[in-house]
Image: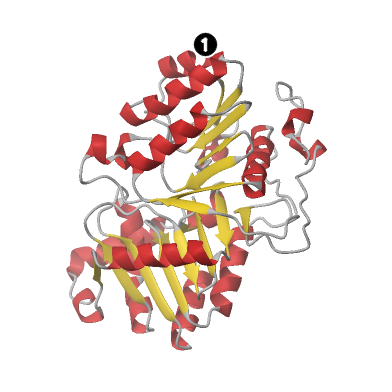
């Protein structure tokens, strides 16, 4: 197995000069997964993994806040850096602009943590500010990885945010798949933003970014293909449901051919315009047999897609323009039976706390609702 230790970790040498570990046992490999739907449990597990690291810790997060939750992990990262480990933190300059102040950044760097902020504002390149690093991942020693929808902030914690904490989902896994995540992180760190390896392991699961050098809209192409081939179910969870016309068409066509198509989004939101845009599509979808639900108790922030019995995805990408065309995302795609059964179980549990949108009620939403729909549609590609 080729190790990242062969790369000049402190220099600028690219990960592309090394290769991913190749495992060929002649039979399909099965990865073991652990799902987290409670932030307190996830953050504690991440802290334990960081504490047990022996060589390196790589963390990427769209939002990294130095609050009660963030400080738990930041203290562990600084402690490991002082011990001589290679500790890197890659945050989005916009997403973490408020929660990770200059003082906190100085503290991290003083402890030896290597910190980068993605796409800081530049008057010379103002348009790049629209393209954000939306990934959320942690990989330790190339052996244990976490990825999913949870940001690192108090909104994910029942202990610190209370019963209205965000409803989210993260997954943890080990082995060759975790090593692959480490290579993704390192490539992005060195500026290879569209790097993606060929699938080299006979695995039941794999990692994919939303964009590669070979396909600018790779994730969209993958999802469109899966929706087109679905024969039994399409169950989607997304907080921001703003699909383009082609993706809406695939959902409608699937429902027309008898597939159980369900969209689970959120009633409570942190982006009213995104919700207006989502609701503008409800009428068309419901009229064609797609069932639409809004989760009521809390802000639903998970990003999951389940197709039939043997295909599922979980990661950082929403079902919207920004994730499919603009931002940088990372997604786990899996044909692992145990993982997909657990994701289906979680989906059905959340449906019990959701209201189904009924066509007759939707048509009576009034003039204000109609005007919000129109405004959301105008803004949909920028939300």
Can residue 112 be spotted in the picture?
A: no
- Which residue is rendered at x = 25% and y = 52% of the image? 298
Can residue 11 be spotted in the picture?
A: yes
Residue 5 occupies quadrant: top right
* In this rendering, position of residue 120 left or right of residue 24: left
Q: Is residue 298 above or below residue 99?
A: below
* Whole-percent x, y for residue 227 in the image: 54, 74
- Which residue is rendered at x = 76% and y = 52% of the image? 23
* Coloring scheme used: secondary structure
* Residue at the limit of the structure toward the right, as seen here: 17
Q: Nearer the viewer, residue 53 or 184?
A: 53
Q: Quadrant of the N terminus?
A: top right
Q: Nearer the viewer, residue 143 or 149?
A: 143
* In this rendering, position of residue 318 left or right of residue 326: left
* Residue at the limit of the structure toward the bottom, as seen here: 257
- Which residue is rendered at x = 30% and y = 65% of the image? 349
* Whole-percent x, y for residue 362 in the image: 23, 74
Q: Which residue is mark 1?
A: 110
* In this rendering, position of residue 132 left or right of residue 28: left
Q: Nearer the viewer, residue 379 or 60?
A: 60
* Whole-percent x, y for residue 137 in the image: 52, 41
* Whole-percent x, y for residue 363 in the image: 22, 77
Residue 100 occupies quadrant: top left
Q: Nearer the viewer, residue 68 or 85?
A: 85
Q: Is residue 297 above or below residue 162?
A: below
Q: Residues within 10 Å of mark 1 (few under 14, many from 20)?
A: few
């Amino acid at each position: 197995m080729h190790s990242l230790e062969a790369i000049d970790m402190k220099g600028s040498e690219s990960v592309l000069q090394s290769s991913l570990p190749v495992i060929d046992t002649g039979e399909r490999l099965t990865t073991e997964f652990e799902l987290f739907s409670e932030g307190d449990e996830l953050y504690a597990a991440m802290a334990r993994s960081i504490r047990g690291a022996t060589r390196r810790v790589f963390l990427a997060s769209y939002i990294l806040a130095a609050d009660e939750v963030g400080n738990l992990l930041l203290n562990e990262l600084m402690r490991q850096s002082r011990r001589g480990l290679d500790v890197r933190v890659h945050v989005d300059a916009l997403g973490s602009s408020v929660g990770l102040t200059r003082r906190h950044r100085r503290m991290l760097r003083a402890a030896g943590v290597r910190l980068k902020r993605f796409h800081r504002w530049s008057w010379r390149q103002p348009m790049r500010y629209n393209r954000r690093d939306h990934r959320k991942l942690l990989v330790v020693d190339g052996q244990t990885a976490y990825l999913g929808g949870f940001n690192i902030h108090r909104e994910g914690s029942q202990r610190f945010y209370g019963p209205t904490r965000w409803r989210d989902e993260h997954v943890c896994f080990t082995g060759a798949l975790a090593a692959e995540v480490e290579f993704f992180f390192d490539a992005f760190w060195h500026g290879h933003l569209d790097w993606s390896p060929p699938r080299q392991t006979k695995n039941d699961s794999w990692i994919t970014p939303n964009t590669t050098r070979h396909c600018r809209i790779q994730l969209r192409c993958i999802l469109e293909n899966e929706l087109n081939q679905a024969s039994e179910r399409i169950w989607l969870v997304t907080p921001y449901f703003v699909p383009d016309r082609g993706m809406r068409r695939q959902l409608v066509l699937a429902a027309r051919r008898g597939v159980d198509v369900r969209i689970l989004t959120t009633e409570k939101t942190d982006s009213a315009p995104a919700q207006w845009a989502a609701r503008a599509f409800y009428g068309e979808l419901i009229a064609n047999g797609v069932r639409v639900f809004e989760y009521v108790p809390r802000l639903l922030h998970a990003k999951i897609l389940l197709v039939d019995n043997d295909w599922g995805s979980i990661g950082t990408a929403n079902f919207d323009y920004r994730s499919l065309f603009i931002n940088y995302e990372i997604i786990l795609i899996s044909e692992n039976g145990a993982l997909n059964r657990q994701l289906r179980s979680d989906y059905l549990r959340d449906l019990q706390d959701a209201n189904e949108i009924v066509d007759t009620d939707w048509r009576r939403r009034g003039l204000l609702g109609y005007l919000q729909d129109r405004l959301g549609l105008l803004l949909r590609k920028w939300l």
